[in-house]
Image: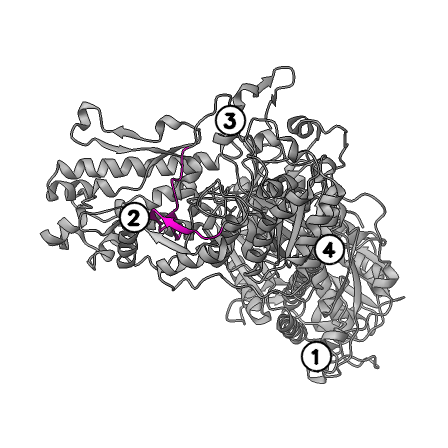
Amino acid sequence: MHISTKPQPLFLQQRGFQSLSVTYQSRAVDEFGSSALAKDSLKGTPTASGTGEGRILSEQFLHDRHTPGPKKMMTLEQAMGDIKPLELSPELTLMKEQEVTGAKVIDGKAIAKAIVKNVKSEIAMFKAEHPSFQPRLAIVQLGEKEDSNVYVTMKKKTCQQAGIEYTEHHMSDTTSLKDLLSTIEKLNIDPSLHGILVQLPLPPHIDAKIVTEAIDPIKDVDGFHTTNIGRLAKLSTMPDFVPCTPKGVLELIRSTGIEIEGKTAVVVGRSDVVGAPTFHLLNKNNATVTLCHDKTKNLAETVKTADILVVAAGKAELIKGDWLKKGAVVIDVGINAQRDLSKKSGVRLVGDVEFSKAQHIAGHITAVPGGVGPMTVAMLMENTLLSARRFWQAQHEAGALVKITPLPLELKTPVPSDIDIALGQQPKNIKQMAEEIGLGADEFELYGKYKAKVDPDVLKRLEHRQNGRYVVVTGITPTPLGEGKSTTVVGLVQALGAHLDKIAFGCVRQPSQGPTFGIKGGAAGGGYSQIIPMDEFNLHLTGDIHAVTAANNLLAAAIDARMFHETSATDTMLFNRLCPKKKGKRRFAPVMVDRLHRLGIQKANPEDLTPEEISQFVRLDIDPATITWQRVMDTNDRFLRKIEVGRNATEQGHERMTGFDIAVASEVMAVLALSADLKDMRQRLGRMVVASNRSGQPVTADDIGIGGALTVLMKDAIKPNLMQTLEGTPVFVHAGPFANIAHGNSSVIADRIALKLAGVEPGTDASQMGYVVTEAGFGADIGMEKFFDIKCRVSNLVPNAVVLVATVKALKMHGGGPEVVPGKPLPEVYLNENLPMLEAGCANLTKHIQNAKKFGVPVVVAINKFTSDTDAEMALIRKLALEAGASDAVPCDNWAKGGLGAVDLGQAVIKACDKPQDFKYLYDVKDSIESKIETIAREMYGADGIELSKEAREKISTYTRQGFAGLPICMAKTHLSLSHDPTKKGVPTGFRLPIRDIRASVGAGFLYPLIGNMQTMPGLPTRPSFYDIDIDFDTGRVVGLF
């Protein structure tokens, strides 16, 4: 088959399929007009003839336009060898060979009606098994020509009768060619549409040929595209679609019962729409065919030889009745208007054949009208069903069999620096990555060569799919250096995707630039398990953090501005400014109406408000002492932790103390991470509480009127960012909320998209499911607990396994080892084998395993192996982890070997995900605030209880009164200990957890108790990372990142 160079819907282009052999349980499957009914879908049920007989045609559909190599072909004999004609009941004029005494009139209307009915039946039966299946046809019409309106109305009516949904795209007759082609291109790449019909004729300024060629051949249900016509013309190839009228002609011929093979056929008319395709179609059915036209010499003699005559010349009664061979089958495609004053309309319709005489000579003949016309629309329905079945079959077969092309790694010893490794690997173009994972061209936006944003609307297309496996990576209580969770996430995804032949997605947070230029460095993983390009990942990425900064600071400015204006204006002045008269009329912005409703004022006309209601409406009366909203920036700057604003003379009397947080500590970032979609994000941003008024009531972003503007600033940030690992496996990078005052997890949207892309079609073997690996910040006592109790509660996603990362270094620290200090060499004890110290420290590992199992999820321990670690240490950790209840415990060497070093971990995760789970939350969200905090303290940290400060108790009372008691809890405590004291290692006991304060992130949807002093603006060390960061002017590359 010739393969078109036009792009197809991308889920039809997945690697691993050189061809797709599709069994269509449909009479619509026969490209060449077969009337065969499905044996599987209709066996034992009445067909159009009531016999229940049928057959299956196995039809090959080549769709992979990327994979080189020979393409498998279905032979013409396979396609045409044993096709049975449609058997019509007597009342639908079943034709039989007989002595001709008068032509049998072929009832095209009745046959077309039976076909449409059959299409409807097949759709219904298939939908009963596969509810997501729904054929859809796009109908494009330009202008208001009466005849076009009639034809389009007829097609829409037939769609309804057949159970096919349609979308109308009615454009002006002055529409430019450019705009029309733009519309067609959007329809081409819309995977929910299976056919595109452009109603002809088009206005004179539009070249119909260009328009026809713009339609993707696999959606060209009219069959007019050059690719389809060309494939029909060659005996060795098959079109995606046979043109509807020729297909209907063949159906009418077959309805007579004539054996086409070996017969002499004559086609009069050579148009690209009817004549030429009909010639090729009869030729494929082994008739001996002659193509004639009105200029053919000796036309009468040629017609006289025809056993089968098809006339589509467009000339009234061109073919005379006495030209016909006795008993011939005559299909008259023409329809011409002749003046006839005896008719009410003044005209009568005649065909291209002289019917009055022909009916006495022909064996079978079509009427005009009522012959071919209805069949054309019926075949359009069949072609649309055929296309929908192909799309469904391809998506079903390719669902979890998408093939990612891995990138080979050149491993070096010793392992080079992170930046050298990252720069030494050539990433795939992100467009290729997007296509490999099954995204349509309209479902991602390129940000340079190696980054793309993915449209969350892809979830609508994939909503019927079963989710893939869901794995969360967390860790034991870490040292200040971290234990390699990000590296483990990347290594596990590389192992699953590049070495174990699984579909695997990583989902990670976007790092803040503060730590990147501070002391921690980047967060792209490390060694041979990194996300690339590493410099783009760690710096601006696609600007999401900048969008968070802009939204946060716009709100901060609005708070101070509102207080400023309220103190210097009367109620009337404020009302006139908030609702100014325009052309003599006031109006409320929609956000203002919502505020009125929250105040209990059910009025929509500003002029209807009473003075008391005006005062309620215009005055927020913010208490400056209660403002919790601070400005943010994505830079570590300790001198902005506490500042005074309003010091200029123009703001005299409005001074107040406030401060800056790091951008990722903004509630806007937490909202981004937890939003289900754009609408949900809008609602959450509007609900954010920024202060209380002097009556103690919460003041929200929507009270200030800014929720919509914040959403506009964040509308692109809600789209997850697609990148790749060093081995070319896909990674979503999205959102980066703090892991102490927020929940420290990447976005819900990214996880949901990845789970659908890694998922399978309903009914597919579960072994074909892919894997989504996400990371929870800090240790399991913080990040994992928040992942389960906040993120999973919001998303309704159920995890299949926990991967708990541990290192010998951290376990020795918990067993009594000396302090680990960033920037200083590790003490010798961490570099030499010490099994007693290691065994003592494994108590921390045991506690975290037990914590994870409280959620009913299997646990796999990943031991992040360093060069100084011994086999005896690995064996001891594994032994104690299994005794504590872990499903497995395996060493990982992916830092040095990439995915190859995490294959054992990947296999352990696959086994763990196959185990049953009994997922449950740690607490009921309806419990009291105090009870929820105490449950976390006792169950996760091992505390004896909690101690609430006076301020914390007051906040509990306030939040309960304000209606926020039902929110989940996000504990803000140190990550360096299970307790509140970072110096207490191992598994501390005998302590009560002090709750200093409680704050609310109402938009994000949680309360966060403060345990100790939480720093939300880091500072720079004596020697920040920026000393080493620079540009190589010869290559233009970033150097010095780690």
Residue holding disc 3: 517
Q: Quadrant of residue 152?
A: bottom right
> Distance between the Cα atoms at labels 4 and 2?
54 Å
Q: Nearer the viewer, mark 3 or mark 4?
A: 3
User: What amino acid type should be assigned to the residue bearing mark 3?
Assistant: Phe
Task: Judge the density around disc 1: few (<14), some (14-19), many (≥20) Cα neighbours within 10 Å.
Answer: some
Crowd band around label 4 with a 10 angstrom C-alpha radius: few (<14), some (14–19), many (20+) = many
Q: Is residue 767 magenta?
A: no
What residue is at 54 percent from the left and 71 percent from the top? 343
Q: Secondary structure at mark 2?
A: helix
586 on left or right of 366: left
Task: Please tell me whether residue 594 is drawn above or below residue 28 in the rendered image.
Answer: above
Place of residue 934 in the rendered image (x, y in percent of width and height, measured from the top left): 41, 57
Q: What is the crowding at mark 2: few (fewer than 14 residues within 10 Å), some, or many (at least 20)?
A: many
Residue 652 position, x and y percent, is 16, 27
Between residue 557 and residue 314, name the one nearer to us.
557
Identify the element where label 1 is drawn: loop
Provide the secondary structure element on which disc 4 rests: loop
Decide which of 903, 880 is in the foreground and name it: 880
Q: Nearer the N terminus, badge 4 or badge 2?
A: 4
Compute the Cα span from label 1 to label 4.
26 Å
Pair 3/1: label in front: 3
Q: What residue span does the magenta drawing correspond to?
A: 989-1017
Circle 1 sits on which residue? Answer: 48
The residues bearing labels 2 and 1 have C-alpha atoms spaced at a distance of 62 Å
Pointers 4 and 2 in contact (CB under 8 A)? no
Spatial CA span between label 3 and label 4: 56 Å
The three-letter code of the residue at mark 4 reads Asp
| Residue with the mark numbered 2 | 702
Disc 4: which residue: 240
